[in-house]
Image (spheres, grey):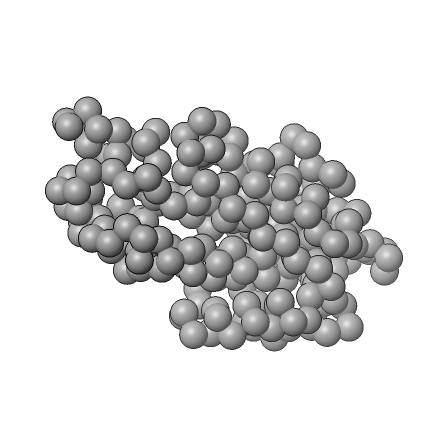
Amino acid sequence: MTTDLFGRNPGQCDNERVAGVDEAGRGPLAGPVVVAAVILDPARPISGLTDSKALGPNRRDQLALEVRKHALAFAICSVEAEEIDRLNILAATMAGMSRAVAALSIQPTLALIDGNRLPGDLPCRGQAIVRGDATEAAISAASILAKTERDRIMCALDALHPGYGFARHKGYPTAAHIEALTRLGPSPQHRRSFAPVRACLSDS
């Protein structure tokens, strides 16, 4: 799907309110999965929006500030490790997406979801777009907000749970993280349903 500079699809009505939705943190062993939903302002386009993973930290932080300042509406939802363990990571992500869209101060008429699945309880029409974070401006904006907010959370968790290196690896299964997990055991922020964490629990 292609969009113009304002994130509108060809043939889209001017009064259509489109929210982009994306997540950060499905793969880590610890911390929440964070979901953002964004409705961009067609009158205030933001240059440089793309997949958050393709941006350096400084540029990502700069764009996050612009999105927060210029978007018509945005909402960010965190789904904590306990709920991830209870639901599974896919269901927890879908739940977070529905909550983020429902939390928008302006209700959209269409939600563009990054990926190939749609939450079952969206409060509006939905469309799944594979690699949408690189092709749809609103999804790119949501990707940037989700990533920067999750990074902030993981840095805060590093201070609460020292020794794991959360500020460095953000909970992803790096060699240093696995070593710390093996040495210290899981923290309250670790996802116990994930195999490397579960293995540490079975060894203790």
**Residue occupying the point 62% across, 36% down:** 118
Q: Position of residue 50 (x, y in %)?
A: 54, 64
**Residue occupying the point 70% across, 51% down:** 104
Against 64, is 166 above or below? above
The C terminus, quarter of image? top left
Outermost residue toward the front in this view: 160
Against 84, is 22 above or below? below
Q: Is residue 51 visible?
A: no
Q: Which image quadrant is residue 8 in?
A: bottom right
Q: Is residue 125 left or right of residue 112?
A: right
Q: Nearer the viewer, residue 182 or 123?
A: 182
Against 192, is 180 above or below? below
**Residue occupying the point 51% across, 35% down:** 92
Q: Is residue 72 left or right of residue 197?
A: right
**Residue occupying the point 47% across, 50% down:** 24
Q: Position of residue 73 (x, y in %)?
A: 71, 60
